[in-house]
Image (spheres, helix red, strand yellow):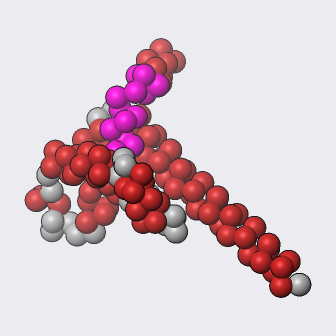
Amino acid sequence: NAILGDYANILLENMRSNVLRWLRSAELSCDRAALLVAQDPKIVISMMMKLAGGSTKLSKDLNVEEYMKQAQMYEKATSTQLGSMLRRSQTDYLTHPLPILRVVEIEKFAESGKYRKLLREGRSAI
């Protein structure tokens, strides 16, 4: 029965990992929806910074452009095989993506043809 227990643990770990990945993906979908509403990535990123910072006293000192640069640096640093492994080790047990990764994804979506197409289709439906 020890072997059966090992298989059950592997199965449960795989299920847990998939559920957490789904939760993180759902958060990114919410971020994309926020961008569709705000139609300005800097507004969405500013909101993310404020939520991550946790203090309204700090909000006036936040610099969206610098945070976007940090996000690009993080993306570059984690684009190698080792960086990718480190990124996964940071995020695999989280229910939400790291704020810096959310910024990377917002920037990618804002520059995508899919985003522009959704904006065009939304305007034509009004």
Q: Residue at x 54, y 50 (%)?
A: 26
Q: Residue at x 37, y 56 (%)?
A: 83
Residue furthest front as drawn: 81
Q: Is residue 45 left or right of residue 3?
A: left
Q: Residue at x 70, y 63 (%)?
A: 15
Rendering quarter of residue 54: bottom left
- Magenta: main secondary structure equals helix
106 within the magenta span: yes
Which region of the structure is painted magenta?
104-116
Rendering quarter of residue 113: top left
- Vertical position of residue 125 compared to residue 52: above or below: above
Q: Is residue 109 left or right of residue 47?
A: right
* Camera-nearest residue between 74 and 100: 74
Q: Position of residue 110 (x, y in %)?
A: 35, 32
- Vertical position of residue 84 compared to residue 116: above or below: below
Q: Is residue 17 left or right of residue 27?
A: right
How many marks the image carries: the answer is: 0
Q: Position of residue 3 (x, y in %)?
A: 83, 79
- Vertical position of residue 42 compared to residue 23: above or below: above
Q: Position of residue 118 (x, y in %)?
A: 47, 24
Q: Is residue 87 visible?
A: no
Residue furthest left as drawn: 61
